[in-house]
Amino acid sequence: MRLTSFGRIAEPLPLIGQGTWKMGESKASRADEAAALQRGLDYGMNLIDTAEMYADGGAEEVVGEAIAGRRDEVFLVSKVLPDNASRAGTVEACERSLKRMGTDTIDLYLLHWPGEHPLADTIAAFQELREAGKIRYWGVSNFRMADLHECERIAVGENVTNQVLYNLQRRGIEHEMRDWCRQNGVMVMAYSPLDQLRLTHKQQLKEVAARHKVTPEQIALAWCIRRKGFITIPKSGNHQRIKQNAAAVDIQLTEQDLGDLNKGYPLPDSSAELECL
Ligand SMILES: NC(=O)c1ccc[n+]([C@@H]2O[C@H](COP(=O)([O-])OP(=O)(O)OC[C@H]3O[C@@H](n4cnc5c(N)ncnc54)[C@H](OP(=O)(O)O)[C@@H]3O)[C@@H](O)[C@H]2O)c1
């Protein structure tokens, strides 16, 4: 797996990690889901993204099962729900997440989306958690430009990432956010890189995939990470697709590929600053 070093995170991270949304929903499939995440770790996709929201903590439990005995290999990302993100609530939510995952540190802890609690309170809790060694970095998710600016006003230089919806069909962040993140060392973590299987297989995508002898989904992943400062976190519970997702890191898209994909999936107008699922 190729690694990237970028911005405010001091260590290299895999360009392609693993998502966990929809995991942990049924007790019967948990062992298989944990095994799938372990398979991804075997391929070097050792950034795992989860959240207290997913399956009401069930996904974090699956992650706990997957990383048991392998914690040192993993860069672990989880998220606090906005409703819990008061000063005290954030600390309590983090402690519950740590317990579910059987670890004493979350590498990167995110606010899942902007909510009603003052951002300054959430950030104060993040700082307290960081000082206590319960998290190593903090970041945000689904933040628009105005929210990112507010973050900098409260704690300049601290927010390490914005985890956002970004894929061939959802490119609104390219208008402004992409360059701002690059200039400020804020990693973009592209979620739903396959648009949760809603990615239309346009002719151009099929042609680029055929040229590289890979699947359209692999091209979609390679496209998300084509620029420095981006990583992506596809979710798969299927061993064959996990292998394909890991292999996508080695696809080098050419100028011709990128031009063709631009034609098939043009940039939306600037009103699409950021979409959410
Ligand atoms: N911050 C946020 O608000 C937010 C929102 C959404 C998601 N996320 C995070 O981002 C992660 C990824 O996004 P997502 O789960 O929404 O959607 P996604 O990764 O775009 O799509 C997941 C779907 O694609 C399938 N899939 C995976 N690899 C494939 C491949 N190589 N070929 C064909 N199908 C493939 C999976 O099925 P199989 O499992 O059967 O392979 C699954 O149904 C989430 O799991 C979560 O961790 C964050």
Image (tube, rainbow, N blue to C red):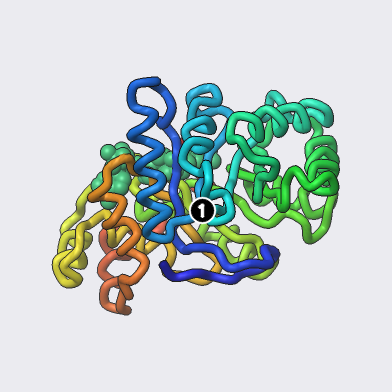
- 212 w.r.t. 74: above or below: below
The residue nearer to you, when weighing 273 against 12, is: 12
User: Does residue 186 appear anywhere in the picture?
Assistant: yes
Q: Residue at x 23, y 50 (%)?
A: 240
- 130 w.r.t. 98: above or below: below
Q: Residue at x 37, y 59 (%)?
A: 43
Q: Is residue 259 left or right of residue 165?
A: left
Instruction: Indicate the amino acid at tag 1.
Output: Leu
Residue 196 in picture, x, y percent from top left: 34, 40
Residue 254, located in which quarter of the rendered image? bottom left
Residue 227 in picture, x, y percent from top left: 47, 70
Q: Residues within 10 Å of mark 1 (few under 14, many from 20)?
A: many
The residue nearer to you, when weighing 102 against 215, is: 102
Q: Residue furthest bottom?
A: 255
Ligand 1 falls in which quarter?
Answer: top left
Q: Residue at x 58, y 35 (%)?
A: 101
Residue 274 in picture, x, y percent from top left: 53, 47
Residue underneath mark 1: 47
Under circle 1, the secondary element is strand
Q: Residue furthest front?
A: 69
The residue nearer to you, when weighing 243 against 138, is: 243
Residue 210 in picture, x, y percent from top left: 14, 66
